[in-house]
Amino acid sequence: MQKDSDIGLAELAEAAGATTSSCWRRLDELRKTGVIQRSVAVIDPAALGLTVNVFVQVTLEKQNEAALRAFQNRIARRPEVMECYLMSGDADYLLRVVVEDLAQYHRFVVDHLTTIPGVANLRSSFALDQVKYTTALPTAHLRGSEAVGDPAPRRKPPRGSARRKTE
Amino acid sequence: MQKDSDIGLAELAEAAGATTSSCWRRLDELRKTGVIQRSVAVIDPAALGLTVNVFVQVTLEKQNEAALRAFQNRIARRPEVMECYLMSGDADYLLRVVVEDLAQYHRFVVDHLTTIPGVANLRSSFALDQVKYTTALPTAHLRGSEAVGDPAPRRKPPRGSARRKTE
DNA sequence: ATTGAAACGGATCTAGC
DNA sequence: GCTAGATCCGTTTCAAT
C-alpha cells in the first residue's frame, strides 16, 4: 500500500516480506498499467492559509452536452476547485472549493462561477473542520496485474527502454 | 509547484530558474516546516474498480463533544471514507465514500455508519462522474520561507538538523 | 521462466568556495 | 549564493533455481 511513496523500496520490500527486485517489478507494472498514475506532494492547506472549504451545489439551466462541457472546461481551469462531481438528484454539480477566506470565496463566485453561461443556481455549504482527508483508496485487494476495465493503454517497450524523461 | 513530486529537482530548478542546490534547500525547509507533509502515489480509482462516489450528509442526534469525537473516531478507521467534513447548515457531517458498487455502499451504511451511536439521519447523493479531482492546492503565492501570518520569519536552522529517517 | 542479488548510473544531498 | 564531489537509491543486468 502506497500512503508514503518516498519510503524507498528497501523498506517497502522489508515490509512486504519480499525482495527489492520483486517489489520494483510490481511497482513498474503498476505504473505501466496506469494503476499508479503519478506521485504528488501533499501540502498542508493551513500552512498556505487555505483554511476554508466550501461545497457548492451548482444547478444548470439546461443539462445538454454543450452546457456540461462548457461548465467542466471552465471549472477545470480554476485552481481553487479541488473536486467537481456530476451528481444525481437535486443539483447537477458538486464542487469542493478551497480558499483563504470568505472574501476570496465571494470573489470566486462572482468572478468565475456566475460568469459561466448556463449556471442557474448555487447553494454553498461551508465546512467548519476537515475531519478526514486521505488520498489512499480502500485497497481491499490489489490484484497482480489485471485491473477492471481498460485503464491505461500503455505501450510495452521491448527491453531496456524504461527511460523516464532524462535522455 | 509540486504536482509531480518525482520530476527530480534538476528539471524543477530549470523551471524555477534556480540552481539545484537552492531548490533542494527550499524543499528541505518546506518539509521541515511541515508545508510539505509527505509524498503519495496517486492511484486510478477505476483501475481498482472503485467507480462509485457517494456523498453522505450525516445528521447526529446531539452535537456535544462526546458524540462528535465518537463519530470521528469511527469514521477515521473506515478506509472507504475518503473525506469527512464537519459542516455548517442542514447536516452535521459531509462524507465522500468510494466503493465498487451500490451493494458495497449499502453494506457500508448498514454495517458501519448506522452502527455509530448518535447517528440520526443519512442523506446519500451519488456522483455520476468525477469531473475533476486534484490534490494540488491553489498556490497563489509561495513566499520565501514562512507561509501564513507569522511576523518573524528569520529562522536559520543550525545546519545539522536535517535528519529525516537516516540515522 | 521466474526470482533474487549484485553491479551500474544517475540523482540527491553535503561540504566547500 | 553556486560548484563539485560523496553517498544513497532506483534501475538494470545477470545468474541460479
Image (cartoon, coloured by chain):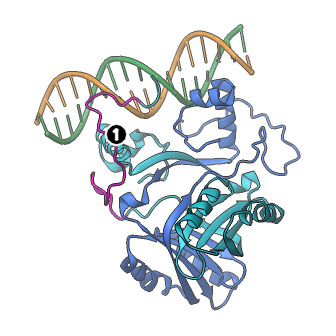
Chain colours: A cyan, B blue, C green, D orange
- Give the amino acid at mark 1: Trp
Q: What residue appears at the point 64 percent right and 72 percent down from the top-left corner?
A: B85
Please state the horizontal and vertical placement of residue B67, each as a whole percent of the image.
63, 84
On whether residue B79 falls in the magenta region, the answer is no
Please state the horizontal and vertical placement of residue B50, each as a whole percent of the image.
40, 65
Q: What residue appears at the point 74 percent right and 66 percent down from the top-left corner?
A: A114
Q: Is the magenta region chiefly helix, strand or loop?
A: loop
Between D4 and A65, the residue placed more toward the observer is A65
- Element carrying mark 1: helix
Q: Quadrant of the N terminus of chain B?
A: top right
Q: What residue appears at the point 68 percent right and 30 percent down from the top-left corner?
A: B16
Range covered by the magenta-colored residues:
A140-163
Q: In which quarter of the image is the C terminus of chain B?
A: top right
Chain of residue at mark 1:
A
Between B12 and A87, the residue placed more toward the observer is A87
Q: What residue appears at the point 44 percent right and 54 percent down from the top-left corner?
A: B43
- Left or right? Give the position of B64 relative to B48: right
Displayed quadrant of residue A90: bottom right
Between B118 and A79, the residue placed more toward the observer is A79
- Left or right? Give the position of B77 relative to A80: left
- Left or right? Give the position of D3 relative to C4: right
| Residue A18, above or below B80 | above
Residue under circle 1? A24
On whether residue A146 falls in the magenta region, the answer is yes
| Residue B69, above or below A98 | below
Please state the horizontal and vertical placement of residue A157, each as a whole percent of the image.
29, 33
Displayed quadrant of residue D4: top right
Displayed quadrant of residue A78: bottom right
Please state the horizontal and vertical placement of residue B62, each as a whole percent of the image.
67, 90
| Residue A69, above or below B160 | below
